[in-house]
Image (cartoon, grey):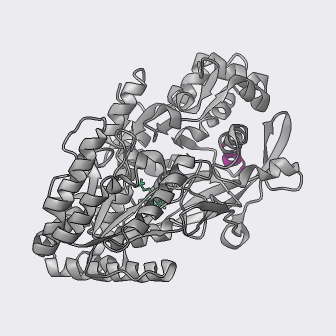
């Protein structure tokens, strides 16, 4: 046992994990996609590993949104209203934050994440819907990623400043590490600055104050593109936060050209910084050459994302997998028949769900391709349909297949909405040769059906925009191999023909769309579809290796353990 471990047991340091979205439970719609799922899986693994952690996020009474698609694929949205009262426990303390000079009252609701060995991690969801607040302030914790930049900045005040104050009010006096999951919560650094400045306000903060805050913060960046980072103009920041905090932000160099970049603020104050895959570390270092950036590749929570048939298989052969994901490595000694049988069952469950949701009967014997993720331009949901004649030829001459889609477009992402319409159009054009179905309401529950029930998980992002990607990891846990662009986690998780297949051979960080398209069709036509129909054992062997090699590593237990070892415990050893 090393020194850190023994110290920890005597004085457990608490890690406060801040995230704008968290995927806690299928019934709690406080997430939009990968970032929230990652946060949820991190908290689930932390409770499995008995890491003293507490989560902080916003309540979102109206959720992300419910997605409705008409016959042409036009998306409309309605609020995903839910009942916090039924699922969460209200906490007593009230704290306040100052927004545009008003005192906005904040309370918290508790959700408890239970770990496999009886430990747990509380998550506090902040709420401003209190009668003492103005009607507008009451809406601040209604919508995830709704509203304009001003609404967002006010939400980030509640998350960062309100969250830090709430932890103190709840008695968390010994938070050793504040982990910012993406830059949205970076205003918490202002609260810590003030705390170290002995609550004398934010003028004349000293170098020692800054260093003290730097020593307490950890930052995970998830965005490989500058446009994806939250930025607020100085006049807006001044109006919302007031003069003193704005001047303090200026003094620490958080404004660039008069704009507050939340990623920058988080970078300035973090002792440990990481990207979410090795490739993403490389991209982040080129974007922020002045900061020491490491990588801890994302992972998914094994028990949460494994379908029932595979849970039964793992339970039978290595029941230890429930508390130690490394045991998944031993799937290598399970027979191909066992893998096949478990997968047939998972596929049957998915096809039943498709029939229930979309009224479409798919053929269980047909190769089934899955594609589901946020509908947004860089994910290129329609890359598969770049050459319909060639696609039809493959289906007619090499082997038939069917495709299941899912994914919500952000309400203001017109490009994403157009992609959904395009898939509907193509589905109509292809309907006599290739069945294509687009399912509404891609969420945690549907993701689990899809990632486990298809035969091939397709991912076609534009390089280098996929920081990591995690749905392919969920697929791997269920023995479903990926066919994916070499970006994000797939750069390191891919072994050609062993754990799945690449689209494009190049390891270069930029995409060449015409080469991506040619490679996508070549792989389907010459390698994957023929193997699926003519060499079923070879295909099942790839499925088994996807579990043994990828699921045993790309899980959130390994990831959370790496955060412990690299980011939380060794506070003085951040890589320079
Ligand atoms: C896992 C998951 C995601 C993230 O998947 P990517 O591969 O990163 O796109 C998004 N949305 C939902 C509902 C998920 O379950």
> Which one is nearer the viewer's eye here, 305 or 64?
64
What residue do we see at 18% from left, 56% from top?
Answer: 523
Give x and y (percent) for residue 221.
46, 38
The quarter of the displayed image where residue 539 is located: bottom left
**Left or right: where 102 falls relative to 115:** right
Name the quarter where the C terminus is drawn: top left
Main SS of residues in magenta = helix
Can residue 552 be seen in this snapshot? no
**Quadrant in which ligand 1 is drawn:** bottom left
The residue sitting at 18% across, 67% down in the picture is: 529
Region of the chain picked out in magenta, as a range = 163-169
The location of residue 138, given as percent across then percent down, is: 81, 52
Q: Is any atom of residue 62 visible in this view?
A: yes
Rendered location of residue 290, percent (x, y): 42, 20
Inspect the magenta stretch and tell me whether residue 440 lies in it: no
Is residue 468 or residue 414 the one in the foreground? 414
Q: In this view, does 315 lie above or below 16?
A: below
Q: Which of 506 and 304 is in front in this view?
A: 506
Position of residue 331 measured from the top left corner of the image (x, y, whole percent):
19, 70
> Which residue is rendered at x = 13% and y = 68% of the image?
531
> How many numbered circles are shown?
0
The residue closer to the viewer here, 482 or 141, is: 482
Does residue 12 sit above or below 268 in this rendering? below
């Amino acid at each position: 046992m090393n020194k850190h471990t023994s110290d920890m047991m005597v004085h457990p340091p608490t890690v406060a994990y801040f995230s704008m979205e968290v995927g806690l439970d299928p019934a709690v719609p406080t997430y939009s996609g990968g970032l929230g799922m990652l946060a949820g899986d991190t908290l689930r693994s932390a409770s499995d590993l008995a890491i003293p952690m507490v989560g902080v996020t916003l309540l979102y009474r109206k959720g992300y949104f419910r997605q409705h698609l008409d016959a042409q694929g036009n998306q409309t949205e309605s609020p995903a209203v839910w009942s916090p009262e039924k699922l969460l426990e209200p906490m007593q303390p009230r704290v306040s934050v100052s927004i545009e000079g008003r005192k906005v009252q904040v309370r918290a609701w508790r959700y408890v994440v239970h770990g496999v060995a009886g430990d747990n991690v509380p998550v506090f969801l902040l709420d401003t819907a209190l009668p003492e607040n103005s009607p507008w302030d009451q809406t601040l914790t209604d919508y995830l990623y709704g509203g304009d930049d001003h609404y967002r900045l006010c939400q980030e005040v509640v998350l960062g400043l309100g969250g830090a104050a709430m932890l103190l009010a709840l008695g968390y006096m010994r938070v050793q590490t504040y982990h910012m999951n993406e830059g949205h919560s970076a205003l918490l650094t202002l609260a810590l600055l003030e705390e170290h400045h002995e609550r004398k306000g934010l003028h004349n903060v000293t170098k020692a104050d800054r260093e003290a805050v730097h020593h307490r913060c950890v930052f995970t960046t998830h965005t490989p593109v500058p446009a994806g980072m939250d930025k607020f103009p100085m006049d807006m920041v001044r109006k919302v936060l007031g003069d003193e905090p704005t001047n303090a932000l200026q003094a620490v160099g958080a404004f660039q050209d008069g704009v507050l970049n939340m990623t920058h603020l988080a970078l300035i104050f973090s002792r440990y910084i990481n990207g979410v895959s090795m490739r993403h570390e490389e991209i982040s270092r080129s974007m922020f050459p002045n900061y020491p950036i490491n990588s801890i590749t994302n992972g998914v929570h094994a028990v949460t994302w494994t379908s029932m048939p595979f849970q039964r298989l793992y339970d039978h052969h290595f029941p230890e997998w429930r508390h130690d994901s490394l045991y998944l490595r031993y799937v290598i000694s399970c027979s191909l028949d066992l893998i096949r049988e478990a997968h047939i069952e998972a596929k049957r469950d998915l096809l039943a769900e498709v029939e229930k949701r979309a009224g479409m009967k798919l053929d269980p014997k047909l190769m089934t391709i899955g594609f589901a993720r946020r509908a947004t331009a860089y994910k290129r949901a329609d890359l598969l349909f770049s050459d319909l004649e060639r696609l039809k030829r493959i289906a007619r001459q090499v082997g038939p297949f069917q495709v299941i889609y899912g994914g919500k477009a952000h309400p203001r992402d017109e490009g994403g909405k157009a992609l959904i319409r395009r898939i509907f159009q193509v589905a109509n054009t292809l309907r006599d040769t290739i069945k294509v179905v687009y399912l509404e309401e891609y969420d945690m529950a549907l993701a689990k059906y899809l990632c486990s029930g298809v035969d091939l998980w397709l991912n076609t992002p534009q390089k280098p925009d996929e920081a990591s990607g995690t749905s392919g990891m969920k697929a791997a846990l269920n023995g479903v191999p990926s066919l994916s662009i070499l970006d994000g986690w797939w750069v390191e998780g891919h072994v050609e023909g062993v754990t799945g297949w690449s689209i494009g051979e190049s390891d270069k960080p930029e995409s060449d769309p015409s080469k991506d398209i040619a490679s996508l069709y070549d792989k389907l036509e010459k390698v994957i579809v023929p193997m699926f129909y003519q060499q079923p054992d070879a295909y099942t062997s790839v499925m088994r290796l996807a579990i043994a090699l990828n699921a045993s590593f790309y899980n959130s237990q390994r990831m959370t353990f790496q955060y412990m070892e690299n980011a939380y415990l060794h506070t003085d050893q951040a890589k320079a």
